[in-house]
């Protein structure tokens, strides 16, 4: 009886750990850049400086789901449930509007975003292949 209880507890702990690990793997990652007003820099070129320190706020159905601080290189990564999301930067006065402002998280795989703060547009996000495909 005691061995069965220990076995069940160990199995439960293992399943919980695996589920928690899978749930925390980032499935949304990308970079936030600011446009450059100087001559010779074009949108989507390496001279777009990162918008580090900004806070990205992710909403779904009008409700805030989570927020993430952008790293020194403008990179960010997080895990979101599948669905359609809106993203904005906070405070908007320092960063401006973010484009694209909406994106879809696929049921399988991940999405890679290149968000641009302020003026200008960027290509829509491109879903990556599901893991193991």
Image: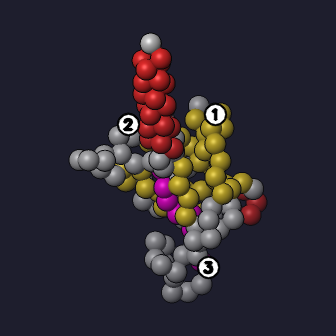
Seen in the picture, residue 32 relative to 77 is either above or below; the reply is below
Q: Position of residue 63 (x, y in %)?
A: 65, 33
Q: Where residue 42 is drawn, which disc sits there?
A: none
Evaluate if marks 3 and 1 touch, with contact meaning CB atoms under 8 Å apart.
Answer: no
Q: Residue furthest top?
A: 1
Where residue 53 appears, as percent x and y from the top left, is: 69, 65
**Residue, x 42% and y 27% (percent of image)?**
11
Q: Residues within 10 Å of mark 2 (few under 14, many from 20)?
A: few
Specify the quadrant of the image occupied by residue 61.
top right
Residue that numbered label 3 is attached to: 37
Residue closer to the observer: 123 or 79: 79
C-alpha gap between disc 3 and disc 1: 33 Å
In three-dimensional space, the C-alpha distance between marks 3 and 2, rounded to whole angstroms, equals 38 Å
Q: Of circles 3 and 1, which is in front?
A: 1
- Residue behind mark 1: 62
Question: What kind of secondary structure does the magenta stretch mostly adopt?
Answer: strand
Is 35 in the magenta?
yes
- Residue 126, x across and y down, in percent: 37, 53
**Dot 1: what SS?**
loop
Q: Which residue is mark 2?
A: 107
Indicate whether 44 appears above or below 85: below
Give SS at disc 3.
Answer: loop
Lower position in the chain sequence, tag 3 or tag 1:
3
Instruction: Tell me where the magenta segment starts and ends, as one range.
Output: 28-37
Q: Which residue is at 57% across, 71% downward?
A: 73
């Amino acid at each position: 009886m005691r061995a069965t209880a220990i076995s069940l507890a160990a199995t439960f702990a293992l399943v919980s750990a695996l589920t928690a690990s899978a749930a925390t793997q980032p499935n949304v990652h990308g970079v936030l850049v600011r446009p450059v007003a100087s001559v010779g820099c074009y949108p989507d070129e390496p001279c777009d400086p990162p918008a580090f320190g900004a806070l990205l706020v992710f909403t779904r159905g009008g409700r805030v789901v989570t927020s993430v601080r952008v790293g020194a290189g403008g990179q960010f990564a997080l895990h979101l449930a599948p669905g359609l999301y809106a993203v904005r930067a906070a405070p908007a006065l320092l960063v401006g509007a973010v484009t694209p402002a909406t994106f879809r998280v696929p049921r399988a795989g991940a999405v890679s975003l290149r968000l641009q703060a302020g003026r200008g547009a960027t290509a829509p996000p491109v879903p990556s292949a599901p893991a193991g495909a």
